[in-house]
Image (spheres, rainbow, N blue to C red):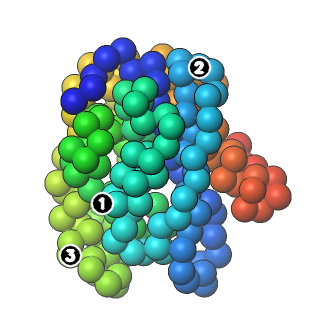
Amino acid sequence: MKTGGFSYVVGFDDFPFERSHRGNVQVVGVVYNGLRLEGVLSGQVRRDGRNSTRALTGLIQHSKFYPSLQLVLLQGIALGGFNVVDIQALSDNLGLPVLVVSRRKPNLAAIEAALRKVRGGKQKWALIQKAGAIEHVAGVYVQRAGLSVKQAEHVLRRLAVHSHIPEPLRTAHLIAGGIATGQSRARP
C-alpha cells in the first residue's frame, strides 16, 4: 500500500440531483499534487445503488493519474444518495489509503432508519459499520482505511486551506455543483 507523504491526492464528490431522480448520478474527482490542481476525473454511480466501490476503482485505475496517486478522499461515505462505498475494499483494490470526510458528525441513527427503506439497506449499513468509528479530526469527522489518525490529521491540516474541508473535496464539490446547476455553492 502506497502511504508516502500524500502529495498526490484525488477527492470525489457527487453531483446534486433532484429527489425524484432515478438512474445514474455523475461524480467528479479532482486530482491535486500538493495544493496544485492537476486534473479532473468524471464518472457515474447508480442512485441508491451498489456500484460506487466498483465505479471508483475503475475510474481511478484507468486514469493516467493512478500511478502517482497516494490517497483517495471522499466527501461522505455514500455517493448518489445511498450508494455506500466500501472503503476497505476500495483501499485494497487500489493499494491506496482512503479517507472519508464529513463537515458534520453523521447521524447514524437517522441513516440506519433511512436505510431500512432502501433496497439492500442491511448490506449498506454493514458497509458503514465496516468503515470503522467516526472520528473527530482537525475540525471534521472522518472514517479511514489504510492510514492512521495522525496521518489523517496531517493530510487534513495540509490540504484544508480555506475551510476545514481539504481543497480536493472543496474543488470537487464546486465543480459538481457548477456543472449540474449552472453555478456552484460554497459549502461541501
Q: CA distance from mark 3 to mark 1?
A: 13 Å
Q: Nearer the viewer, mark 3 or mark 1?
A: 3
The amino acid at mark 3 is Lys
Residue 82's place in the image compared with 61, above or below, is below
Question: Within the image, what quadrant is residue 149 found in?
Answer: top left
Name above or below for residue 188 compared with residue 53: above
Asked which secondary structure carries label 2, the reply is: loop
Q: Position of residue 181 (x, y in %)?
A: 77, 62
Q: Is residue 99 at all visible to an observer of this figure?
A: yes
Outermost residue, right side: 182
Task: Judge whether 176 appears above or below 30 on screen.
Answer: below
Q: Residues within 10 Å of mark 1 (few under 14, many from 20)?
A: few
Which badge, 1 or 2, is on the more N-terminal residue? 2
Marks 3/1 in contact by CB < 8 Å: the verdict is: no
Upstream in the sequence, badge 3 or badge 2?
Answer: 2
Amino acid under disc 1: Leu
Residue depth check, mark 1 versus mark 2: number of the one nearer the observer:
2
**Where residue 81 sits: x, y (%)?**
47, 69
Determine which residue is flagged by label 1: 108
Estimate the x, y position of residue 183 in percent, counting from the top left. 81, 53
Residue drawn at (22%, 30%) of the image: 1
Going by the image, does 174 lie left or right of 10? right
Mark 3 neighbour class, 10 Å CA radius: few under 14, some 14 to 19, many 20 or more: few
Q: Which mark is residue 20?
A: none
The residue tagged 3 is 122
Dot 1 falls on a residue whose secondary structure is helix
Q: Which residue is mark 2?
A: 35
Disc 1 from disc 2: Cα separation? 32 Å
**Which is more toward the observer, 167 or 61?**
61
State the SS at label 3: helix
Q: Earlier in the sequence, mark 3 or mark 1?
A: 1
